Amino acid sequence: MAEESEKRFDTLKIHAGYDPKHHNYASQVPIYQTVAFGFGDSERAERLVNFKEKGFSYTRVGNPTTAVLEQRIADLDGASEAVAVGSGMAAVSYTLLNLAEGGGRIISASNIYGSSFDEFRTLFPKFGVHFDFIDDINDRSQVAAAIKDDTKAIFVESVTNPDTAVTNVEALAKLAHENGVPLVVDNTFPTPYLFNPIRYGADIVVYSSTKGISGHGEVVSGLIVDAGKFDYGNGKFKQFEEKEFVLGNEGESVERSFVEAFGTKAFAARIRVKYLRLFGAVLSPFDAYFVLLGIETLSERLAKQVASAVKIARFLEGHPHVTSVHYSGLPDHPQHELVNRYFPRGVGAIFAFDIDGTEAQTKKILDSVKIFSYLPNVGDARSLIVNPGRTTHREIPSANRQKSGLTNTLIRLSIGLEDADDLIGDLDQALNKAFE
Ligand SMILES: Cc1ncc(COP(=O)(O)O)c(C=O)c1O
C-alpha cells in the first residue's frame, strides 16, 4: 500500500490493515469466529471461487480477522502480501514445497532450528526435495559452488538459534538472483522490529509468530511474507506456469497459470490457493487476534528485552565459571560490523552461554533458577532457559552440533520483561549452587 509505506513502524503496528469503518467502527479488530461467509448472489459466488474477486467464502482460505494480521505483517515488512498459517513449521514447509514441489534442490544453512534441519534432512527427500547444507552461509564461494541447475531456492535464518550468528542477507540475495532463484529468510528471532530482510533483497520471509511477534507464549502460529518482486515465470518453476483449473473453469479458455493470473505476486497467491486451501494448516481467527494484540507492543517489548539481554550477557561474560557467551549483540563479537549494519536496534534477546563445568552442573543451573522458566520456547514476556543440546536441538547430529559450539553444557536464555537485575540475581544464585 503506497499510503501505508509512508507511515512509520510504530504507527503501522497499531493500525495497518484495519479500517474501523468497515467493522462497525470497532476500535479493536473483531474476531470473525465463523467458518463460512454468504456468497451474496450466484455471480459473486463464481467470481469468489475462481479467485477473480477478493473476498471471503470459507475460513480455511481466508478470514477478515486473519486478513488484518496478514496485511499488518506485510506492511511492517514492506511486502506485497502475507499468508498466516497454523505454525512456524507450516510456514517453513509450505514455503519450500511451493518452490521445490515436484522435485529439486534447496540450499540451506546447516546452522538452523532443529526441527527445520530434521525436516530438510529426513522428510523433504521423501517428497523429492533434497538439500545442500552449507556450514558457513556467509562464504559466497561455498554457496555459489552448491548452486545446480535444479536449485530452487536459498534458505537461511537471519539470526541463528541459539548462537545468534548473523546472515549477510544482502550478499546472499544478490547471489540468489544472479542464479534465478529466490532467497527465503526465516526472520523469527529478530522479528520485523529488529530486522527487515526484504529491504536487503529477500524474496520471501517466514516467521514462527509463536515467538517474539506475539510475545506472550500463548499462541502457535506462522506467517509467510512475499516481497512480490520475484519472476516465477523464468522457466525454473513449472508449477507456477502450468494452467490451473482452480483459477478458471474447466474447459473454458479462461484457465490461467499463477504467473498469468498474479504476475510477480504469484508466490503468496499459490500458497493460499494450493497449500492453505488443500493442505489446510490454517490459523484460527481467535489465534490471529492474539498475534495482532502482541504486535501492538512489539517495539516496546523488544527494546526493553534487548537492553536487558545485553546487560545480562555482560554479567555472564564476567562470571568466573562462564567460558563463552554466544551473543552477536556484544561489541567484541567477530560479526560486530555486520550486526551494526543490519541491526541498529540490537540483534535480539535470545542468546546462549557455556560453562566450565559438567552436564550435571548445567542441569543444576536449570533446576535452581527461580524466575527463569525451563521450557522449549523463546520470545515470551517471561524469561526462559533451556539446554538446547538435549531438547530443542536434539535432532541435529552431534557432528553438526559440535561445529556450532552446541555442547550439552550450553544454556540458552530468552530474556523477557522482568527486571534485568532480578534476572542477573537469579542466574547468579543458580550458578553459585551449581559450583558450590
Ligand atoms: C527459527 C525458527 N523457525 C521456525 C520455528 C518453528 O515454529 P513453530 O514452533 O511455531 O512451528 C521455530 C521454533 O522454535 C524457530 O525457532
Image (cartoon, grey):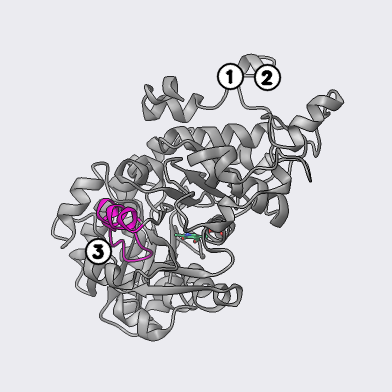
At label 1, counting other C-alpha atoms closer than 10 Å, the crowd grade (few under 14, some 14-19, many 20 or more) is some
Q: Earlier in the sequence, mark 3 or mark 2?
A: 2
User: Which element type, helix, strand or loop, lies under badge 2?
Assistant: loop
At label 3, counting other C-alpha atoms closer than 10 Å, the crowd grade (few under 14, some 14-19, many 20 or more) is some
Q: Which residue is mark 1?
A: 19
Q: Nearer the viewer, residue 260 or 147?
A: 260
Q: Are marks 2 and 1 in contact (CB under 8 Å)?
A: yes
Q: Is residue 208 magenta?
A: no
Q: Residue at x 63, y 46 (%)?
A: 272
Q: Residue 243: where, in percent of width, then height?
A: 65, 49
Q: Which residue is mark 3?
A: 138
At label 2, counting other C-alpha atoms closer than 10 Å, the crowd grade (few under 14, some 14-19, many 20 or more) is few
Residue extending furthest toward the right = 42
Amino acid type of the residue that numbered disc 1 sits on in the rendered structure: Asp
In the image, taking residue 281 as reference, residue 294 lies left or right, namely: left
Q: Residue at x 40, y 40 (%)?
A: 301
Amino acid type of the residue that numbered disc 2 sits on in the rendered structure: His
Q: Are marks 1 and 3 in contact (CB under 8 Å)?
A: no
Q: Residue 150: where, in percent of width, then height?
A: 44, 68
Q: Which mark is residue 23?
A: 2
Q: In this view of the protein, can residue 292 be seen by the observer?
A: no
In the image, is residue 94 above or below residue 38?
below
Amino acid type of the residue that numbered disc 3 sits on in the rendered structure: Asn
Provide the residue span drawn in magenta: 158-179
Q: Nearer the viewer, residue 156 or 427?
A: 156
